[in-house]
């Protein structure tokens, strides 16, 4: 049965910061997502040095375009040194959108988003380029990612903002303070990322886990010191809650996000088929389960 609450985020299968992703793993993960009822996919021009996520997705939805929703993002790219750069110029946004569509052999994005504001380009100018792409029929809806409330307002001054992407998980809730309420008031869909905080809240990473060389996760503050121990304590409690509710820790963490007012969809990554088979079944939680998780987090705050 299709799950309208979950989108497969394709960044992990690009294999840049997720170590050891094989082409077969990436392909099988997309297949497993489709078999598990996921019909929305989140890709980007910069997902892979050569657009690997675009190419894999295009192959798997070929001939079935109307059955799937494709979210694309432009405004980030890789330079010759394989360093990611932000480029919100009109020329780059248009070229990247056209290239991404060619990679997937698609005629349009369902939603096309500015990947992140460029500090060297007025956000309104970047929005104008997205608007022109929409006028050409290359996308049906538009949006912006990695923004604060004021930046959303600037984007909205140029064209309708149909959706944003922002970080949200049960330990990192800042988006709920101002950004999500503004989106609720102005009829903007909110798609969350970092829902499982790169796997930390999925319950599979142990305290003694050794990350492979090249894995980017140890650089994130939440994977370090007291913050990581706090996360493990919360996961320990969620394991107990999940055992009683018949849900996995990952399903609980995603369900908590989906239960927050104003959240339309959770972007969930994965680079192994079993990962997405587990998370594809996540749904909003009952108020009782949400309260139990909130109490768990509150207690961890008091203890820290």
Image (cartoon, rainbow, N blue to C red):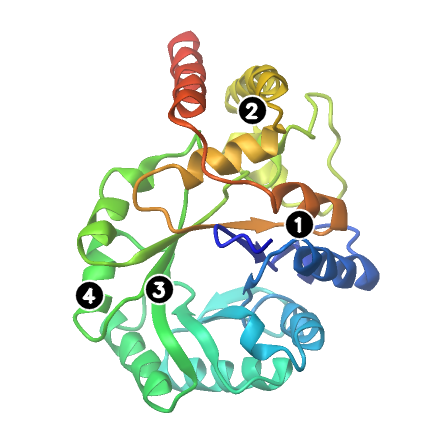
The Cα–Cα distance between marks 4 and 2, rounded to whole angstroms, is: 36 Å
Circle nearer the viewer, 1 or 3? 1
- 88 relative to 36, above or below: below
- 89 relative to 3, above or below: below
**Residue beneath label 4, please?**
154
Q: Do the residues labelled 1 and 2 touch (CB within 8 Å)?
A: no
The Cα–Cα distance between marks 1 and 3, rounded to whole angstroms, is: 23 Å
**Residue beneath label 1, please?**
270
Name the element at disc 1.
loop
**Residue beneath label 2, please?**
228
The Cα–Cα distance between marks 3 and 2, rounded to whole angstroms, is: 30 Å
Q: Can residue 15 be seen in this view?
A: no
Name the element at disc 3.
strand
- 113 relative to 140, above or below: above
Q: Position of residue 272 (x, y in %)?
A: 75, 49
Question: What is the residue that sits farthest to the top in this orientation?
Answer: 303
Q: Sort mark 2 into few (<14), some (14-19) or many (20+) by Cα contacts within 10 Å.
A: some
Q: Where is residue 96 in the image (x, y as percent from the top left)?
A: 50, 81
In terms of sequence position, does the residue under pointer 1 or pointer 4 come before the other? Answer: 4
User: For this view, does 171 lie left or right of residue 271?
Assistant: left
Name the element at disc 2.
helix
In terms of sequence position, does the residue under pointer 1 or pointer 3 come before the other? Answer: 3
Q: Can residue 285 be seen in this view?
A: yes
The Cα–Cα distance between marks 4 and 3, rounded to whole angstroms, is: 11 Å
Circle nearer the viewer, 1 or 4? 1
Residue 193 image label? none
Q: Position of residue 47 (x, y in %)?
A: 60, 66
The Cα–Cα distance between marks 1 and 4, rounded to whole angstroms, is: 33 Å
In terms of sequence position, does the residue under pointer 3 or pointer 2 come before the other? Answer: 3
């Amino acid at each position: 049965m299709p799950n309208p609450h979950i989108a497969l985020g394709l960044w992990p299968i690009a294999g840049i910061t997720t170590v050891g992703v094989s082409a077969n793993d990436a392909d099988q993960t997309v297949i497993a997502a489709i078999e598990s009822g996921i019909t929305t996919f989140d890709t980007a021009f910069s997902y892979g040095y050569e657009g690997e996520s675009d190419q894999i997705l295009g192959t798997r939805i070929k001939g079935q375009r109307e059955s799937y929703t494709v979210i694309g993002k432009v405004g980030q790219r890789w330079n010759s040194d394989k360093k990611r750069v932000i480029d919100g110029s009109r020329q780059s946004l248009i070229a990247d959108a056209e290239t991404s569509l060619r990679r997937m052999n698609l005629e349009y994005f369902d939603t096309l988003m500015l990947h992140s504001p460029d500090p060297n380009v007025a956000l309104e100018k970047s929005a104008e380029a997205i608007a022109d792409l929409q006028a050409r029929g290359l996308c049906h809806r538009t949006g912006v990612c990695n923004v604060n409330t004021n930046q959303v307002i600037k984007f909205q001054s140029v064209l309708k903002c149909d959706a944003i992407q922002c970080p949200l998980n049960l330990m990192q809730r800042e988006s709920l303070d101002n950004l999500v309420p503004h989106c609720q008031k102005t009829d903007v869909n909110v798609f969350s990322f970092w829902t499982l905080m790169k796997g930390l809240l999925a319950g599979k990473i142990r305290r003694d886990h050794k990350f492979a060389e090249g894995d980017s996760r140890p650089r994130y503050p939440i994977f370090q010191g007291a913050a990581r121990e706090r996360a493990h304590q919360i996961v320990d409690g969620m394991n107990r809650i999940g055992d009683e509710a018949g849900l996995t820790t990952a399903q609980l963490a995603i369900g908590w996000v989906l239960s927050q007012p104003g959240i339309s969809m959770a972007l969930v990554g994965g680079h192994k088929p079993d990962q997405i088979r587990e998370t594809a079944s996540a749904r909003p939680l009952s108020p009782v389960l949400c309260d139990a998780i909130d109490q768990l987090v509150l207690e961890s705050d008091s203890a820290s």
